[in-house]
Image (tube, helix red, strand yellow):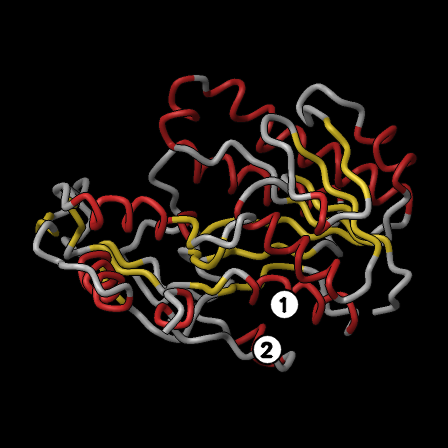
Amino acid sequence: MSTHTSILITGSAGFLGSNLSRYFHSSGYEVTGTWHVREPDMSALHRSVSVELAMASAGTLLADVRPDLVVHCAAVSGRAQCDADPAWARRVNVEATRGLAEAAHSQGARFVFISTDLVFDGDHAPYGEDDAVSPLSLYAATKVEAENALRAVMPEAWIIRTALMYGLDAGGRPGSFLSWTLDALRKQEPLRLYTNQYRTPLYAPDVARLVELLFTQDAEGGVYHAAGPDRYNRHDLGRRVAAAFGLSPDCIVDTLLPRPAPLGPIDDCSLRTDKAEALGMRFTGVILRVLAGG
């Protein structure tokens, strides 16, 4: 990838967006980030644009920025937020994605859409890219709808389904699920973690490396899975976090995630990453001690 490549990252103030911004900015690329509620870290951007994607003209935005590559991270990602206003969730997660893809297609920009492992119901893991989706939440359903809309508009686009992510936030602190896990552990507040929910934790900077591989290799469009090589249930992962940061795990409470009939008792959305690995991608194993400074 040329150091003159222009990259537009939506949701650049978020956890993944800030990780992507740091990676590409530190590598010398021209990075523009959009934000809406919280300002991004400007030290990781060349330029920021305050925009509400659901209300804005995607064509105007892309004509202004003129990116070679759009990485679309922005979304209404909280389940409670989606459930509280389904129409708004679809405007942001589906319609804004379609609009950005149409604008990118018309202007000759490549496009990456960030999706989720939660498009699967957790009953037939590990999942490959061609396995049938079966979302159990409105949030996941909007991601499936966005994937379908994107395929119709821009089949050459790349869809990256990400596993449970971890890493450092924009302030250099443990972010994503590590943030609230560590907060509860430090306060020794009851931390209810599922023993029957499994994930393949993904180190956030690996997403940036995969995006770079897709772009530089001009990879075939379609779905690619991004996930770490290690599989943990949420309870065991919480205990590993406690050990890595030197905290007592005594406040962790074993909890079972209720599963709707006729699904089985285990919720396992573990992802297979064969397609990404065929490009030369090697995902990072869980490195909690490094994040803890150990």
- Disc 1 secondary structure class: helix
Give the number of the disc on residue 281.
2
Q: Which mark is residue 259?
A: none
Is residue 195 shown left or right of residue 175? Answer: left
Quarter of the image for the N terminus: give it: bottom right
| Amino acid type indicated by mark 1 | Leu
Residue 218 locus on image (x, y percent): 79, 69
Q: Quadrant of residue 131?
A: bottom left
Do the CB atoms of the residues marked 2 and 1 lie less than 8 Å apart? yes
Is residue 60 found left or right of 115 in the rendered image? right
In depth, the one of 38 and 8 nearer the eye is 38
Q: Residue at x 38, y 23 (%)?
A: 83
Left or right? Give the position of 210 relative to 162.
Answer: right
Which amino acid type is marked by label 2?
Met
Q: Residue at x 36, y 68 (%)?
A: 288
Q: Residue at x 41, y 75 (%)?
A: 285
Q: Is residue 98 above or below residue 174?
A: above
User: How far apart in space, not on screen, are marks 2 and 1 (Cα)?
Assistant: 7 Å
Q: Which residue is mark 1?
A: 210
- Horizontal side, residue 83 vs residue 226: left or right: left
**Is the C terminus in the top left, top right, bottom left or bottom right quadrant?**
bottom left
